[in-house]
Amino acid sequence: MIASAVTSPAGTLLQSFFSHRLFSFGFWTIDVILLVAIVGVVIVLATDDRDPSIVLAWLFVVLLLPVLGLVAYFFIGRNFRRDSPWRRKAVAQMEAVAAESLAPVEAANTEFTREAVNDLAATPGARIESVGSVEGGVSPLPADTVEVYTAGAQKFPALLAEMAAAERYIHLMYLIWEQDELTARVTDVLLDRLAAGVKVHILYDWFSCLPYRKDELKRLAAAGALVRPCYKRLRQINYRNHMKMVIVDGRSVYSGGMNMGQEYIDGGPRFDVWRDTSFRLSGPAVAPYLMLFASTWLYTGGKEDLATDFMPPATEHHRHEGTPVQVLHSSVMTTFKTIRDVFITALTNARERVWIQSPYFVPDEPLMTAMCTAAAGGVDVRFMMTGVPDKKIPFYAAHAYYPQLLRAEVKVYQYKAGFLHAKTVTVDDQVSIIGTCNWDIRSIILHDEVVAVIYDRGVTAAHAAQYERDIGVCAEIGWDDLAGLSHREKFRNSVYRLFSRLL
């Protein structure tokens, strides 16, 4: 009876009617959910404490392309600087680690720090130090030695030798950990040290390392190393741990622009040269790096209290017993965009020159304004980026900023010998800033970054000399170069610049 009703014309009509009603009801429900989601995102954006240009760009995308816009906003548009329970927990965790590990080192070097700050009085370095101390919470500490490397062929042999002599622990943190000739040598050294009882902790950025095999990391984990990825949660996929550091026994730290891979030595198959800058510090200036490693380890879910277990005893330094180095960190969890603000302070307070190197250039408005204002006011502002790109989108986006820079008399250079990956700033003859932070929105707003502000005339003079050698293999960009661009190329560059505001 039931079967005949369903197969009859009346049954077929009834079935079609209810299917249509259910189909319509389903679409009506989806429409309501979509509308509620759009309204919610609009409210969040309208109350967001972000650059208005970023907010307006996201409003445009969400309203113009509702479904695609909402998906994109969920993954790459949300502002994790907003106050939230998980962010408060992470910040409190970092502050607790700093109080536990860094405070004793700062207390032991109070005299050194006070005299170093006094020596900076009435100089651009004084303003830089003040902004770093207030926003970053870390004052200058003494480095017993400062060694700057301008090529991977300089850094990695020294690093391998020092790791091979480690007695207690080795902490390694990299955005990218490849699997190649260099990582094979590093793995052999770490396996040897693990067999000798040395503790090994490794942090790597999960998303950035997706293209690379993990066989060596798995071998290290099987041998006793503790290995953890950073930012693996789906909601955090737009964020990167861009910091690079190796800490050996608490006596030294290696940091700067170089990741863990053979291409950072020889350029790999893509580049004739890989030009980068890293450094080694020893002494109390290592402590802020250890604090950052320890707090990042806890944030990724690590259980060990690395700050308590591995912080070396605080050693007391007095006036001029070491080089003043201020270690500054910024990320989505810091209240201030500290590194960006220090760049701005350098530009607005320099008397003679600010020479900048960064592979990418997608600045926010305050940083761009500071560059142009400083140059227009007579400061020798130079910006050098790679002329042989690894990523086309940021490379072309940077070109859209060139006219504004040239109008303000900023000198713009493109490095042509290979890939330029250095992230450095030279301020007058007094301050060098070397670290992991690019001059782009991702680095200054989204990434975990760390830089060392080195207050030393000798280091600064050597770095300025290297900058001038780099200019020797650069092409200076002028108005003739911009005039040679086609309308299609100018449009392409402007579109990429527009999309940069969605980060």
Image (cartoon, rainbow, N blue to C red):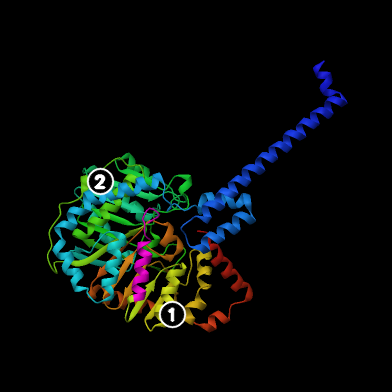
Q: Which residue is mark 2?
A: 306
- The majority secondary structure of the magenta stretch comes to helix
* Whole-percent x, y for residue 63 in the image: 62, 55
- Is 483 one of the magenta-colored residues? no
The residue at the point 36 percent across, 47 percent down is 88
Most foreground residue, 267 or 484: 484
Q: Earlier in the sequence, mark 2 or mark 1?
A: 2
Amino acid identity at mark 1: Val
Q: Which residue is mark 1?
A: 410
Q: Write down the quadrant of residue 320 in the picture.
A: bottom left
Amino acid identity at mark 2: Leu
The magenta segment = 331-348
Taking the view exactly as shown, the residue that stands out farthest to the right is 9
Residue 500 seen: no
Most foreground residue, 401 or 200: 401
* Whole-percent x, y for residue 435 in the image: 33, 64
- Is 345 one of the magenta-colored residues? yes
Distance (Cα) linking label 2 and label 1:
45 Å
